[in-house]
RNA sequence: GGCCGGGUACCCAAGUGGACUAAGGGGACGGAUUGCAAAUCCGUUAUUCAUGGGUUCGAAUCCCAUCCCGGCCUCCA
């Protein structure tokens, strides 16, 4: 069976076949982050799902060329009004950075950036994003170190955007309106609305006072969207035949996907909010510019993340970035698992309980991994093997089948857990004389991990600074001294104090170890 | 108003016509272990799948209706 994926374009699950199926090569474009703030866990759920898809394709033997853009163009905070009002987002970010700088909230590595330089601001958040992405195991973020073209910055493609806009003008799909802005003419593209269901007719009928009337009067159709905005006052601006200004919000992806992956690509991913208008507009621009009937063949959209049952919002205090969670003691591996374990087409509920569950799950797998490695040369007993393989080895096909069924990660995790539970981890394992070894089991575990991607991530919470570490060690020593004297009251008091600090301890055969708990 | 996705145990979450008297994880409970804990190991924990109809030999799975939740239609992953 081949991979089956839900395609937003057709609104149904379809068997996946690459354009270049003969060479098993896949082109994949993911809408990446806007870099005027730290990305939050909702953003990362979308990026991580794209990563899981990519890893699944690789497990199935595809070679994936994955491109993820970095949106570093300022744009406006108010998109509804295309007349240029609203604040430049990069300007806003600069302001915020400046304030954070004053209040000392900024990380030390950001102390000397110039908030008035939009490129520096974008650069700062780009690096922050890449750090987070790498800590969460996004393959693309590692790959980009040797192949920078895989994560293109929008600002580097402005001339190509101008070129595409010119092509659209030449072909009669775009026009310059009375306000000097270049708009895409949605009525010139029959398929407009196919992805989102928002056809020009429906958009017109649903207009109802939501759009600025002055702008609407200028456009041929309310759904016509901006391609180029002449604006000599904009922070980031470039020359163009329509005056100095900046590009529209959708054109960058059409251009970068086209230049780096080709006019027709296999996969395109993003968050569900990208479906309209962003991806709808991309399709229109790309198809009209290239003249090809298709742009991306499969559209993959991740639904929104909610936090503790509520919509994520800054006012509710449930708005988290990766660094927020790490500061609270969460590990990157746990964050990754918590964000990928719910099916991408369901709203996922991020909870701290879930984060802890994920943490424990990973610890158990890590323990299994260590134990299998320790006995890797030992043959498995017949009681554990079927058709020559151990439980994990035999679970591999079911693991793959789960992923092939529209990326059923939770199902795949279930398969892994069930197989893992067949091993009595920790003790001296039973041994047989069969051909399969514990090392083969280890290999199977690693194969599954190529998709889950958690065993190779940081599994321990940040240890804190030296002072804190010394204090923790001192408390533990204090407690162990009390225990030696059978002074249980004092021992328990020390343990409670540590707990208060967010430190949990475990007494093992090799002494006492500690770890940070997520609060 | 239009268009999507969803409602499965205390929580998270698979399963989408027969092997379901419904995976897996967490929690809770009982046991082993421990000074007591934590961690670990063993066991128990949904005759039931939002509700009401229908189709079928057979439904959590298909159809209809109702209720509820989330998203998009406006910047957002």
Image (spheres, grey):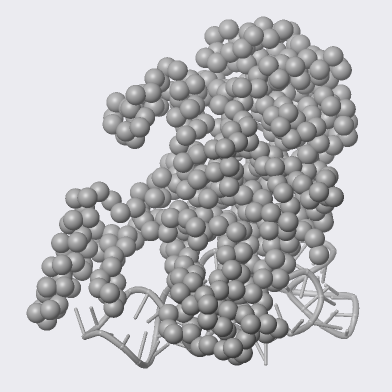
The C terminus of chain A lies in quadrant: bottom left
Q: Write the residue at 80% across / 60% down.
A: A2
The N terminus of chain A lies in quadrant: bottom right
**Viewer-closest of A85 and A205:** A85
A55 vs A427, left or right, is right
Q: Write the residue at 55% across / 71% down.
A: A442
**Viewer-closest of A371 and A458:** A371
Task: Answer with the quarter of the image where residue B14 lies.
Answer: bottom right
Give the image location of residue A161, x and y in percent.
Answer: 70, 20
A342 vs A277, left or right, is left
- Asked if residue A58 can be seen in this view, the reply is yes
Give the image location of residue A126, x and y in percent.
Answer: 50, 32
The correct choice, above or below, for A178 with respect to A305 in the image is above
The correct choice, above or below, for A124 with respect to A86 in the image is below
A302 vs A295, left or right, is left
- Asked if residue A419 can be seen in this view, the reply is no
The correct choice, above or below, for A256 with respect to B28 in the image is above
How many numbered marks appear? 0
Q: Write the residue at 54% across / 38% down.
A: A145
Q: Write the residue at 20% across / 69% down.
A: A495
Task: Answer with the quarter of the image where residue A192 lies.
Answer: top right
Task: Answer with the quarter of the image where residue A275 lies.
Answer: top right
Give the image location of residue A251, x and y in percent.
Answer: 70, 25
Give the image location of residue A422, x and y in percent.
Answer: 55, 82
The correct choice, above or below, for A431 with respect to B66 in the image is below
């Amino acid at each position: 069976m081949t991979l089956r994926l839900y395609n937003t374009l057709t609104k149904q699950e379809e068997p996946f076949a690459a354009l270049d199926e003969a060479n098993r090569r896949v082109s994949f474009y993911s809408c990446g982050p806007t870099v005027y703030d730290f990305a939050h866990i909702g953003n990362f759920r979308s990026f991580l799902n794209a990563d899981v898809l990519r890893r699944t394709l690789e497990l199935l033997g595809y070679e994936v060329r994955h491109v993820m853009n970095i949106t570093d163009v300022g744009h406006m905070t108010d998109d509804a009004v295309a007349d240029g009002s609203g604040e430049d987002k990069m300007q806003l970010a600069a302001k915020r950075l400046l304030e954070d700088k004053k209040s000392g909230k900024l990380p030390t590595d950001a102390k000397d950036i110039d908030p008035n330089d939009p490129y520096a601001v974008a650069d700062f958040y780009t690096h922050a994003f890449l750090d987070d992405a790498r800590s969460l195991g996004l393959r693309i973020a590692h790959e980009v170190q040797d192949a920078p073209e895989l994560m293109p910055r929008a600002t580097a493609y402005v001339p190509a955007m101008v070129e595409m806009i010119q092509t659209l003008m030449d072909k009669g799909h775009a026009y310059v309106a009375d306000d000097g802005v270049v708009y895409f003419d949605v009525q010139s593209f029959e398929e407009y609305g196919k992805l989102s269901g928002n056809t020009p007719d429906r958009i017109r009928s649903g207009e109802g006072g939501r759009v600025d009337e002055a702008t609407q009067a200028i456009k041929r159709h309310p759904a016509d969207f901006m391609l180029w905005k002449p604006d000599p006052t904009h922070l980031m601006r470039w020359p163009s035949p329509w005056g100095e200004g900046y590009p529209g919000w959708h054109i960058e992806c059409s251009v970068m996907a086209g230049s780096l992956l080709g006019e027709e690509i296999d996969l395109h991913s993003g968050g569900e909010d990208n479906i309209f208008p962003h991806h709808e507009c991309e399709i229109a621009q790309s198809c009209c510019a290239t003249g090809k009937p298709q742009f991306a063949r499969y559209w993959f959209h991740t639904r929104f993340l909610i936090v503790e049952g509520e919509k994520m919002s800054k006012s509710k205090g449930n708005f988290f970035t990766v660094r927020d969670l790490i500061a609270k003691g969460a590990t990157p591996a746990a964050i990754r698992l918590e964000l990928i374990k719910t099916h991408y087409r369901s709203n996922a509920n991020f909870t701290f309980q879930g984060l802890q569950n994920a943490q424990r799950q990973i610890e158990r797998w890590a323990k299994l991994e260590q134990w299998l490695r320790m006995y890797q040369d030992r043959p498995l007993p017949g009681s554990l093997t079927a058709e020559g393989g151990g439980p994990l080895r035999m679970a591999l096909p079911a693991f793959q089948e789960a992923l092939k069924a529209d990326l059923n990660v939770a199902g795949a995790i279930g398969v892994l857990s069930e197989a893992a539970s067949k091993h009595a981890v920790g003790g001296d394992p039973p041994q047989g004389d069969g051909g399969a070894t514990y090392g083969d089991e280890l290999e199977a575990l690693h194969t599954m991990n190529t998709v889950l991607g958690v065993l190779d991530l940081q599994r321990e919470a940040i240890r804190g600074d030296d002072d804190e570490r010394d204090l923790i060690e001192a408390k533990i020593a204090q407690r162990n001294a009390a225990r030696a004297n059978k002074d249980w009251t004092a021992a328990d008091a020390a343990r409670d104090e540590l707990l208060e600090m967010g430190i949990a301890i475990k007494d093992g055969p090799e002494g006492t170890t500690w770890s940070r708990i997520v609060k």
